[in-house]
Amino acid sequence: MRVVKIASNLMVKNDALAARLRDRFAQNRTLVVNILSSPGSGKTTLLEETLDRLAPKYSVGALVGDQATANDATRLARSGVPVHQITTAAECRLDAEMITQALAKWGEKRFDALFIENVGNLICPAEYDLGEDLRVVLFSVTEGEDKPLKYPLAFNTSNVALVTKIDIAEAVGYDRLLAQRNIQAVNPDVSILELSARTGAGMDEWIKLIDGLIGAKAFAATR
Amino acid sequence: MELHEITIALSLLEGVQSTALEQGIDRVSAVHVRLGALSGVGRDALLFSWDVATAETIAEGSQLCIEEIPLIVFCEHCEGERAPPPGSGLLCPECGTPSPRIVRGREMLLVAMEVPA
C-alpha cells in the first residue's frame, strides 16, 4: 500500500470560475446580487417587487435556481424582464459553472443589475461564490430568531440580512432585538433591513440600496 | 437528507480520478478528507454517498476516512483563538464577543488517497 498526497480544496474549481465571472461583470458594469434563504422566506415575492420597481429605470435580469419546477421563473417573468430558470435537480445550490452556462444562453445581452435567486437552502449555497457583488440573506419573521446561529456561514458571508414578512411580525411574536443580536453575533458588519414585499413596508430603503449600488458599479468601471 | 453530500462525494471522486489519471493509478483503496464543522456535511450521509458515487469506478469499495475539523474563531477581545460550541453562532465562548473571523471550520479538503501495492 502507498499513500498519494493530493491536498486539493474542493472549492478551487468553483472559485476560479467565480473569479472569471466577477471580471466579466466588472467589464459589463453589471451589479450582481446573490439571494440566499431557506425555502419559503419570500425570495420570489421580494424579487417580483424588486424587478417591478427597477425595470422602468434599468436593464435588469434574473436567474432562478430550483431543484425542480419552473414556477418561480414563471412568476418572475410576469414583470417582463428576462428571467432564466436553472433547474439544478440533484444539486442543492447554484454554482459558478451553472451561472456561466445560463449567461451563455443570453449571448451578449447586458444588464445593469442581475439578480440570482439561489436554491432555497442555507447550507450549501453559502460555500459557492457566484461572482456576485452583494450577497443577501433573507430571513422571515416566522423562522425563529435563532436561525443565524444555526446557519452561521450563510449569515457570516452575507453583506445584507433582509428580515422579510415584517407585516406579520407582531402576530407571530417576532423578537426583533433577539434576532438582531443573533445576526450580529455571526456578522457584526452586516446591514440589516426589515421589509414586507407584500405591503411594501421597507421596500423603498431596499430599492434605494440597490439603486446606489448600480450607480457605484457603473462609476467604478468607467473611472 | 440534503443532497449536499452526493455533490461533495462526486467532487471528491473527480479529484481522486484526475490524480489517478496523472499518476497511472488504476485502483484506490482509501481516500482521506478533511471537513470543517461549518461545511454542513453529514458524516453518515457522506459515507453513504461515497459508496453510491464510487460504484463501478477505480474507487469502488474504498474506505472514506473523514477527519472533522472543529470550528475555531479569532476573538478580538481575548486576542486569541476560541472554539464556540455548535449552535452558538460565532460568539466567543469566554467573553461573548461576536467573532466573525473564522480561522478553521470551513475546510473541504481532499487530502490523500491510498493505493494498494
Image (cartoon, coloured by chain):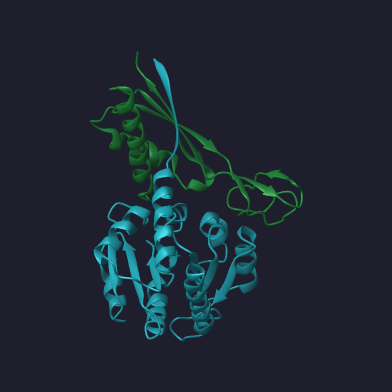
Chain colours: A cyan, B green
* Quadrant assignment for the N terminus of chain A: top left
Horizontally, is A183 left or right of A133 in the view? right
Q: Is residue A34 visible?
A: yes
Viewer-proximal residue among B111 and A21: A21
Horizontally, is A48 left or right of B54 in the view? right
Q: Residue at x 34, y 16 (%)?
A: B116
What residue occupies the far front of the structure in this picture?
A223
Viewer-proximal residue among A70 and A20: A20
What residue occupies the far top of the structure in this picture?
B117
Whole-percent x and y of residue B36? 52, 42
Relative to residue B22, is residue A63 depicted above or below? below
Viewer-proximal residue among B20 and B90: B20
Whole-percent x and y of residue A48? 37, 78
Relative to residue A144, is residue A74 depicted above or below? below
What residue occupies the far left of the structure in this picture?
B56
Whole-percent x and y of residue B29? 35, 22
Instruction: Give residue A193's quadrant in the image.
Output: bottom right
Instruction: Give residue B22's quadrant in the image.
Output: top left
Q: Is residue A92 visible?
A: no
Instruction: Give residue B98's quadrant in the image.
Output: bottom right
Q: Residue at x 41, y 64 (%)?
A: A27
Viewer-proximal residue among A17 and A217: A217
Whole-percent x and y of residue B117? 35, 13
Relative to residue A88, is residue A167 depicted above or below? below
* Total labels drawn: 0
